[in-house]
Amino acid sequence: MNRPPHVRIINKDKMLDIMAVEALSHFVTGFDNGGHMTDKSIDGWKERKRHYNHPILLKTGQTSDSLRTLERGSNYVIVGSTYKVAGFHNNGTGRLPVREIVGASKPLEAKLLKILLKSLKNGR
């Protein structure tokens, strides 16, 4: 079929929502894996000095449950935690080692790029 030239345009709002969900899923997975999801935690979170019956940062689930879309602009989304204590873990303190929960992640960037390219190819 011969049709006039056309361009497929993706739904930007839908794409931002998809990317936010993917990013949140990526970082929540870090809790199950003991880190390994950001460039700074690629080797996993530092072990505790004492043994506990629950994995690191999962005693109550409050930190992982606090991950959500924090801000949405016309061409960006910011995902992170609404739980103040998460900032201490993410950045470390004098007493707490850095256990980065959310941060730059080359694997996540690769996933998001793959989603974007697939969307452009399929026109969704």
Image (cartoon, rainbow, N blue to C red):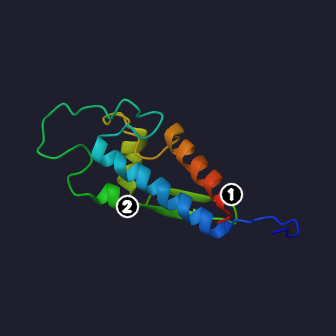
Number of marks in the image? 2
The residue type indicated by label 2 comes to Ser
Report which quarter residue 10 is drawn in. bottom right
The residue at 38%/35% (across/down) is 98
Decide if residue 39 is in sight here: yes
Q: Which residue is mark 2?
A: 66
Q: Is residue 57 above or below residue 71?
A: above
Report which quarter residue 43 is drawn in. top left
Q: Which residue is mark 1?
A: 120
Q: Is residue 67 above or below residue 90?
A: below
First reached walking from the N terminus: tag 2 or tag 1: 2
In the displayed structure image, the side of residue 9 where residue 122 appears, left or right:
left
In the displayed structure image, the side of residue 26 where residue 20 appears, left or right:
right
What is the spatial separation of the Cα atoms under label 2 and label 1, in whole angstroms?
32 Å
> Mark 2: which secondary structure?
loop
The residue at 61%/47% (across/down) is 113
Q: Is residue 44 above or below residue 80?
A: above
> Mark 1: which secondary structure?
helix
The residue at 48%/56% (across/down) is 22
Front-most of residues 45 and 90: 45
The residue type indicated by label 1 comes to Leu
Please identify the quadrant where the N terminus is shown.
Answer: bottom right
Image mark for residue 1: none
Q: Mark 2 Cα within 10 Å, few/some/many (few <14, many 20+)?
A: some
Q: Residue 76 appears at what percent x and percent y?
A: 64, 59
Q: Mark 1 Cα within 10 Å, few/some/many (few <14, many 20+)?
A: some
